[in-house]
Amino acid sequence: MTKIDKDVLVDLFNNNLLYEEIATVFNVYPQSVGKMARKLGLKRSYIERSRVYKSLPPSANWKNRKVICDICKKEFITKVPTAKYCAICRKEVKKLDYDIYLETKKIRTKLRQLVEENYEEALKLVNEMLILEGQKFTTFVTKGIIENY
Ligand SMILES: [Zn+2]
């Protein structure tokens, strides 16, 4: 069913081609390449697989700057040009499965909206989440939106 030849993928991967570049070989989306690579147990750090990183100047030239964490909304200082999360939140994100991470991102966006529109309703939802998904998940999802969960 898939258009991706596994042996060719492994070969291209080992030759350090970006997912975007491998995708053009098979005429598929880069995400499909990433998915297949994960299935095959091929692992690459974000730095190695990202075109964004490759286009950046060498890390020696990176300058300190202040950034607002996308999750907890606290300010942090970083040299990494693409940093979106503070050290604490990044650690938590790393622990999550990628699919769950995407899911929490969606939930967080909706929750942030709901807090603005109807705080009571948002609290109700969070309490339900606490029962269904547990403390850890709920704390992560509500971080920077509703504290103390
Ligand atoms: Zn944070």
Image (cartoon, rainbow, N blue to C red):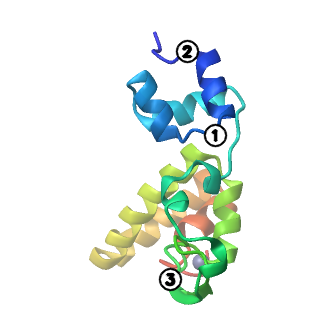
- Per the rendering, the mark at residue 16 is 1
- Per the rendering, the mark at residue 73 is 3
- Per the rendering, the mark at residue 70 is none
Q: Earlier in the sequence, mark 1 or mark 3?
A: 1
- The local crowd at label 1, few if under 14, some if 14 to 19, many if 20 or more residues have their Cα within 10 Å, is some
Quarter of the displayed picture in which ligand 1 can be seen: bottom right
**Amino acid found under the numbered disc labelled 2:** Asp
Q: Quadrant of residue 99?
A: top right
Whether the residue under disc 3 has CB within 8 Å of ligand 1: yes
- In this view, the residue in front, 39 or 10, is 10
Nearer to us: label 2 or label 1: 1
**Amino acid found under the numbered disc labelled 3:** Lys
- In this view, the residue in front, 55 or 87, is 55
Above or below for 110 versus 25 = below
Residue 59 pos. (x, y %): 64, 73
Q: Residue at x 54, y 89 (%)?
A: 65
